[in-house]
Amino acid sequence: MIHGDFKLTESEAILRYIANTWNPDLLGKTTADKSKVDMLIGVFKDLKSGITSGCYTAGTTKDDLKTKVLEGKCSEVSAYLSDHKFLVADYTTLPDILLWEILDMFNWISDNEITKKYPNLGEFHDRISAKFADYLKGDKFIAAPFNAPFAVVNNI
């Protein structure tokens, strides 16, 4: 990322920079919320990397990953969301956006079975999509690929 004379390359640092620059509330409004944001960023990095790493492993198929997604930690995320509209508080934070992205990828991998199995994850995905509808319809949004072009499993 280049913003004026400032350059940054690590994805989490870029996300935090963007939030700090344009919408600090994405990182939490209170100390407790900020701590939950930090915790969930770690949780979702692990959740995503557990699937993404398989996308780069020779011999892996989409069906292999589909099984892993459907048997993975989505049940825990779904259970947590059963009592929450958003992940941290009553407003959107960075983990909501990260989970939206993960669900987007998991929906593709599972042929939408993940949101059939966990309807509240589909409702959450729709709720976050609605907040960014203009962006998602715009020419700057890139729906694919999820991974680098050389990934074994990809949506290109």
Image (tube, helix red, strand yellow):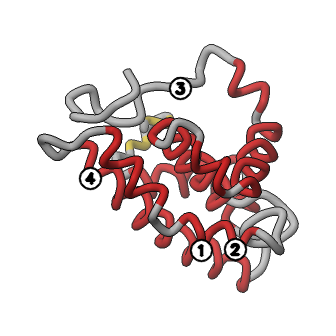
Which numbered disc covers residue 76?
1
The residue that label 2 is drawn on is: 79
Residue 80 location (% of width, % of height): 70, 75
Q: Amino acid at mark 4?
A: Ser
> How far apart are the two marked residues, 2 and 4, measured between alpha carbons?
25 Å
Task: First in sequence, mark 2 or 4: give its number.
Answer: 4
Callout 1: helix, strand or loop? helix
Q: Amino acid at mark 3?
A: Ala
- Residue 21 seen in the current view: no
Callout 2: helix, strand or loop? helix
The residue that label 3 is drawn on is: 143
Quadrant (top left/top right/bottom left/bottom right) for the C terminus: top left
The residue at the point 67 percent across, 48 percent down is 116
The residue at the point 45 percent across, 65 percent down is 72
Residue 58 location (% of width, % of height): 12, 41
Q: Are the residues at dot 1 and dot 4 in contact (C-beta closer than 8 Å)?
A: no
The residue that label 4 is drawn on is: 53
